[in-house]
Image (cartoon, rainbow, N blue to C red):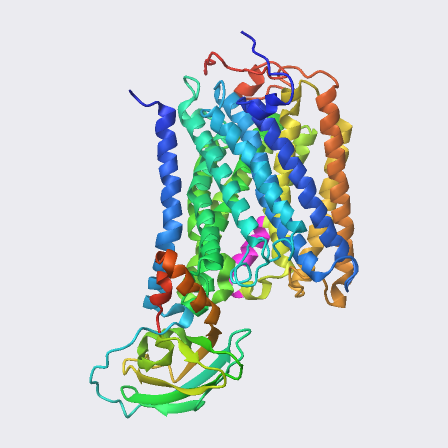
Amino acid sequence: MAISANAKTTIKMLALAVSMLGFALFIMPPLYDAFCEVTGLNGKTGDRYEAVPAAVDTERTVKVQFVASNNENMPWKFTPGVVEMKVHPGEAVDTVFLAYNPTERDMVGQAIPSLVPFKAASYFHKTECFCFNQQTLAAGESAELGLRFIVDPDLPPGVNTITLSYTLFDVTERIAKQTDNKKTDASPIERDSEREG
Amino acid sequence: MAHGPKPGFTRWLYTTNHKDIGSMYLWFSFAMFLLGGCMALVIRAELFQPGLQIVQPEFFNQMTTMHGLIMVFGAVMPAFVGLANWMVPMMIGAPDMALPRMNNWSFWILPFAFAMLASTLFMEGGAPNFGWTFYAPLSTEYAPPSVTFFIFSIHIMGASSIMGAINIVATILNMRAPGMTLMKMPLFVWTWLITAYLLIAVMPVLAGVVTMMLMDIHFGTSFFSAAGGGDPVLFQHVFWFFGHPEVYIMILPAFGIVSAIIPTFARKPLFGYSSMVYATASIAFLSFIVWAHHMFTVGMPIAGELFFMYATMLIAVPTGVKVFNWVTTMFRGSMTFETPMLFSIAFVILFTLGGFSGLMLAIAPADFQYHDTYFVVAHFHYVLVPGAIFSITAGVYYWLPKWTGNMYNETMGKVHFWMAFVGLNVTFFPMHFVGLAGMPRRIPDYALQFADFNQIASVGAFLFGAAQIVFLFNVIRTVRGGRKATDEVWENPQGLEWTVPSPAPYHTFSTPPVVR
């Protein structure tokens, strides 16, 4: 049976609509993530960095500033151990952030980094960071959260100050919800585990 | 032969007739226009004076949100679909729409979508209050519980629009009378064909973005939640990838309507028909690559700002071609100023004005000053009210005699026009000034220095609202009776719709007409 011209048009248009829905749901978000990773837009810093031996550029000094803030409703006390340090590009530097859970319940926190200037984001490497994992603090517990980073020697010459900011989110309920959901449906949560440092 | 409509209510419930469905779309749209208009009047009444007088900020936010959603999805879009239902088959010499039963379905799901949306006003926590652009995380983490109803109503509206658009594409591509080549189609048909493609391309993106919201709210994903590794800015990109083509969805059919009306009352053929077609297509193409001009302030690299700034300004070129063509059509024409022509001329002038403030907003460095101020509100109301609303009104006056067989009351039409014209300008022109002076949009209270202009705007809004009552009265009177219209209605109008009797019989072009 030959299908009518109307049916053909309808099928084509429906296919276009369905593919645009797929584009919005499955292509746009990963594309955006990839785009941000390449350009350093939105200040997200990269994943765990495998340190490669590199010459330390002692000629050059870069100021690195640390900012810690809490997302709304996050009761923890969260501060950088040192507010500012001067580093040479290429050297591995350790620092800590301090977190304290003053509440009377166990909580899980997640720190999300943001770095300015954006063009420095891909030159700031973290070999170890507390932001790669969620932090669990029991009621009244405090912790030193470690961070080890290397400023890439290829950092563009104009950049003399880098500001790394962490925002701490309360993810206690989100984690609880996920463990519930995982029993029934694991797929929608994948983005959580793909989190970038 | 002569099958008439079924008697009784089931005529409307089961109808597959494009004229019946067109009328239902138009009445539905008018009802939504009045509802959204009442919400606008609540907003303007509250803003008549600084301080809080009438409503609480929470309710004010619900009013701005619902006003925007209802006007965009409930008033403007269904009105254009209604006009397309009525006019497209009659303009191309087709007996009906290509998919009549789907046509019935795409209309009848709309009242349910809007009933669901409107019912959120009575829910605990109130209606959506995050603005019609529903930016995450306001619409996800901080949203009232009713947001889920909002999401589903958007899904239904999207399904309705997509079905309507598929129907229009199928009708235009497959049902044209013999001899009606694409480049002989009236411009209203052309603009609707392109609009339908835009709808099919971007309504699924809107469905996608609300689906992501739904997943974030209920299923533990974090597309837009920074805490889970997502990014709220992603929301803005996806939304405006839908949103910018959407604003052209609300204006392209308007271009088609005035391109039909101006030649009739200037008594000259439309100047530059093919350039109009190509300009429409270029605007549609450009609409996909300019979305980020709505979000210059999110922190884009300079290259991005420049790209989106220049791409946006490029749209002024095809739009300028159109305005030039309309003006040239009128130039040295033998013009008369019946109501449809008055609305069309006001469209050309005021839409151009709104276009200019759009150009100002397109300048990325200047936009940082204008962003989220009343200047933006003034801009988009100047393109949407004279653009979409005036052209729909013009279209209704222009084709109403053909639909009903009766002439509308010309005096009342002119009264409607002047009230609407004055009301519109009094309402929205002062908003440019308060915006440039720094009054932010979406606030129930404002600094004292903005009081005078806001009072003027509120007075204008009530005048504009009253004008619509005159319109409603005039339309009802015309439907019920009046001086009989001739088959041609106007003096030598162009197009197949004027070759059928007035009122248009229930079935037209059962045998295809001969085109030239």
Q: Is residue B341 found left or right of B42 in the rendered image? A: left
Q: Against A27, is A80 above or below?
A: below
Q: Is residue B353 left or right of residue B467?
A: left
**Image coordinates for residue B84, horizontal then vertical, percent:** 53, 30
- Which quarter of the rendered picture does the C terminus of chain B lie within? top left
Q: Residue furthest left?
A: A53
Q: Nearer the viewer, residue B101 or A139?
A: A139
| Residue B76 percent coordinates (x, y) | 59, 40
Verify whether residue B356 appears in magenta.
yes
Of residues B455 and B97, the one drawn nearer to the viewer in this rendering? B97
Q: Residue at x 24, y 78 (%)?
A: A50
Residue A44 lies, with reference to residue B463, above or below; the image says below
- Residue B17 location, x and y as percent? 54, 21
For the image, the number of numbered tags is 0
- Give the overall secondary structure of the magenta segment: helix
Residue B188 in view of the camera: no
- Counting from the top left corner in percent of width and height, residue B174 is at 40, 24
Answer whether residue B489 is magenta in the image.
Answer: no
Can residue B88 be seen in this snapshot?
A: yes
Residue drawn at 43 percent across, 40 percent down: B200
- Which region is colored magenta? B355-365
Residue at 56% x, 57% y is B360
The residue lying toward the viewer, choosing from B176 and A192, is: A192
Q: Front-most of B334 and A188? A: A188
